[in-house]
Image: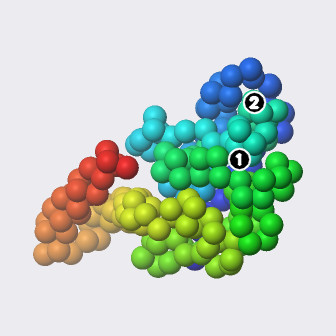
Amino acid sequence: MKLREKTPTRKSDVAHQKDYHAYRDQLASDFNHRCGYCDDRDAPRAASFEIDHFVPQTVDSDKITDYANLVYACKSCNNAKRAKWPTNDKALPNNGKEGWIDPCLKDYEAQFERLEDGRIHPLTEIGIWMYNNLKLWKKQHEILWNVERLEVNYNQLRALHKQGLLPDELKDSLFQLCDQLLEVLKSFYNVV
Ligand SMILES: [Zn+2]
């Protein structure tokens, strides 16, 4: 499967701000309320999402308030990425083996796939480098992906139930089980 359903696109006509934090709402919207790197959704922990500088502030101080250089990112990815810039050339995000690809490029998606169980799997040499340096192997990405899918399927199941299309013998235990499971999984949001 593809890593994500939609490629984020930064709007090109965003008014310049002196403080990059002022871009937050616009950036969240342009990134479809998902981390640009791992595709975790921000709800219900949007407050913990951060603004990453694609070219780190220490590498190019001219781009600190440049909207085109910002990535909406979860805490995990932003903390893992930090100021890593292996090419040491601010104009060169990667050398084909190490470094970064802007998550707003289609090419970013070509570096990874999503396995059926929700894990992110790197497909290329640079994909492996980003996978390791963003710690995309962390269990939370797999769990959060599955929580989201469970919610979608559960809502569909409830709709069928309302229409009387769910067999009686299954529904009580099924709904109870799903309620319990969702609560357990949602509690995970508080620790990531
Ligand atoms: Zn992330």
Kindly report the distance in space between the C-alpha atoms of the residues bearing marks 1 and 2: 12 Å
Give neighbour class at mark 2: few <14, some 14-19, many 20+ (Cα, 10 Å).
Answer: some
Inspect this view and state whether residue 149 appears. no
Identified at 74% across, 33% down, the residue is 64
Residue ranking furthest to the top: 18
Q: Answer with the quarter of the image where residue 164 lies.
A: bottom left
Identified at 82% across, 48% down, the residue is 90
**Residue with the mark numbered 2:** 65
Colour scheme? rainbow
Q: Is residue 149 left or right of residue 23?
A: left
**Residue with the mark numbered 1:** 54
Q: Quadrant of the N terminus?
A: bottom right
Q: Nearer the viewer, residue 70 or 25?
A: 70
Q: Nearer the viewer, residue 94 or 34?
A: 94
Q: Nearer the viewer, residue 17 or 59?
A: 59
x and y, in percent, of residue 58 in the image: 71, 38
Amino acid at circle 2: Thr
